[in-house]
Image (tube, rainbow, N blue to C red):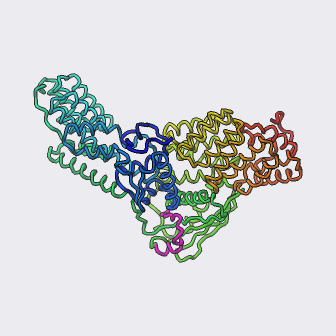
Amino acid sequence: MAIAKQNLSLSLLGPFVLDGEASPSLPRRAQALLALQKGRPLTREMVADLLWTHSGPEQARHSLRQSLVVLRRTLGGAVIRAEAELLAVPAEAIAVDVVEFEALASSNGLGDLSRCAELYQGELLQNIGSVSARFDEWLEIERKRLIGLAATVFRRLSEARAAAGDFGGALAAGRRLVGLDDLNEEAHRWLIRLLTKSGRRAEALRQYETCAETLKRELGITPEASTIELMHSIRSGAAAETAPLARFTMADTALPDADRRQIAALRVSSLKLGGKTWVRIVGALAFACVVAAAVGAMTIKPRAVLPSLTLVVAPFVNNAGVDGQDLAIAGIADVIVAELRETHSLRVAQYREDDVVPVHDRVAADPAARFVVEGSASFSSSLDVNVRLIDRNGVALWSEHYDAPRGDVLNLASDIATHVSRAVARDSSMFRADQPAVAESKQTARELLALAAYVRFRVSALSVATFRRIVGRVVEHRPYDAEALALLGNGYLNEFSVTLLPGDLVEAERYFDRALEVDQANVVGLWGKCYLRRMESRFADALELCRRVIDINPHHAGALREIGYDLLGLHDASAAIAWFQAAIAAAPTHPFLDDAYLGIAEGELEQEQIETARSTLQDSLRYDHWGSRNGLWLACVLEIAGHHAEAKSALAEFYQHHPEFSTSDDIAARLFFVPSEHRRLLVDALHRLDPTETRADKG
């Protein structure tokens, strides 16, 4: 439901609040897009690059257009103004708290400072979670800048209220200052003086103890001499309540913890320095911090400086000619890059997709590129990869063809990286001296998750184990990464399809819940819990979870499809078929398009349209790039329709795609485990085709 179209209010300081609604149904990147604006026009290129860092330029622009559609539908067309390549939120359309906060922060008026302090409800976009690598970097810089500005506001407000005789108000602002930065010793001293001036000596001494304990716990140091002297004067009564309050300055306000610890180290090692020398050190460090923050704010997209010589990994060519395999094939190149960098310590540059400039022309124009890894790939029931290493003149140094199981991509990438490393070993300058830990960086984590997206296939025990191993590495190093947590839950869900162990479902839900604690709008987490509820025959609960995904992204093909399955569970076949058709229309090249056709066929079975279901399943096989279960359904439906010979042929083809299944009982247990009104019908047909007696209960 769209909210009011004019005079909207947007709060970014603290939790994202739009027009008074603390949890608006806006996707996370749409929220980030609004935060980027803050009353300033930005280019489409900058926004796309910040919010979709790891997507190609075309995909990033497409995603940006989708986000703009969602914002206009939710907020009204006047909120986002697009003029040529610029995007802007007009000031008359929406009031943004950050804009007002920054405008009032420079005022000396008590009313303006009070309003400014009221606006600061927490750090910028407090609960948004990770959006993309470059946006996260921008957000960190902006948060530090605004924290420093807020500290200045609280200090000046506290001073102004104290000067006006409002010690209660001065204490409130002083406490907010200390709460913002409890390592700022000068702020503690100001609060101690305020408490003493207010006649609250016991509280003043407790504030000193709090200050001393914090400094010891966080920095391993004791308070400065002036703080200790102030404490002694309060205990002795020398700090009279009638003494005037001195104004204070904060040379190190809002410094990052790393810089503050550096200051602490200097303080400990320089106790013999005079006061003026110490002030110069603090001032120099504070100035360096400000300069670094300013430079960081101006270089949102840092330009990569390539080493003197590099090994280039070019985009792998999609030999399958199927759009849905593009991401998976890109994932192969990503993990080869990770292996070359992390395992073999090679200097590696990666070229992303560029339809304009051919790879060889890019190499010719790049004097740092000495060697190039290039290849092509496709997959159906197996992974087919051609790869070669050439020098910058096009001379082939090594090549190989792989025909590997789909889940064996890690071993494949490792083998490629080993051969490449050996081939370039004669050139020692290609190798780095440093070797960072695997999965420590955001970039490595993203590469591993891209690989996990590749190996997330169905029913293959090898693929499931590989998937769990990859995502588990990311979660180990990034325990609050919502994306990784949700994917690990998905891994346990896939594991259940192989093992049928209830414990896997318990673990899946645990990781889905953890992901949603970090990010309530995590689509994979919501989607996974939807699937779990449906397995428990709680179709109404499942439907509600999937609708939450649609609220976040109305064009999410997977959620549209899952709603169809929920409606099948609620015996509304007509509505279910309509949702499956909507999923197909939303993403006609989606890798799991065959699932939507399977859902339509199941709806047609419920309507007792056997021949129509048979035709739909035959159509679905045109989109079944994974060798999944549609062929099994087709075999069973053909048997139900009385086409025994065709059914036997379809089952034989399914076995060819899935050698891991040896009996019909094994297949029935693992592929028909989702509750269905037609499960008994399908299982009976399967056992007529392949009457293997291995289970007492064939249901």
Residue in the foreground of this view, choosing between 260 and 295: 295
Where is residue 407 drawn, in percent x and y?
66, 52
Tell how many labels.
Answer: 0
Q: Is residue 416 left or right of residue 667?
A: left
Q: In which quarter of the image is the C terminus?
A: top right
User: Which residue does the image show at 52% across and 61% down from the upper left?
Assistant: 58
Residue 11 lies within the magenta run: no
Q: Is residue 76 left or right of residue 241?
A: right
**Is residue 620 in view?**
yes
Which segment did they paint magenta? Answer: 346-365
**Is residue 269 in view?**
no
Q: In which quarter of the image is residue 154?
A: top left
User: Which residue does the image show at 47% across and 56% down from the upper left?
Assistant: 53
Where is residue 96 drawn, in percent x and y?
35, 45
Q: Is residue 688 left or right of residue 368?
A: right
Residue in the foreground of this view, choosing between 5 and 26: 5
Where is residue 256 drawn, in percent x and y?
32, 45
Q: Relative to residue 243, is residue 291 depicted above or below?
A: below
Residue 351 lies within the magenta run: yes
Residue in the foreground of this view, choosing between 261 and 536: 536
Q: Relative to residue 179, is residue 415 depicted above or below?
A: below
Where is residue 470 drawn, in percent x and y?
58, 49
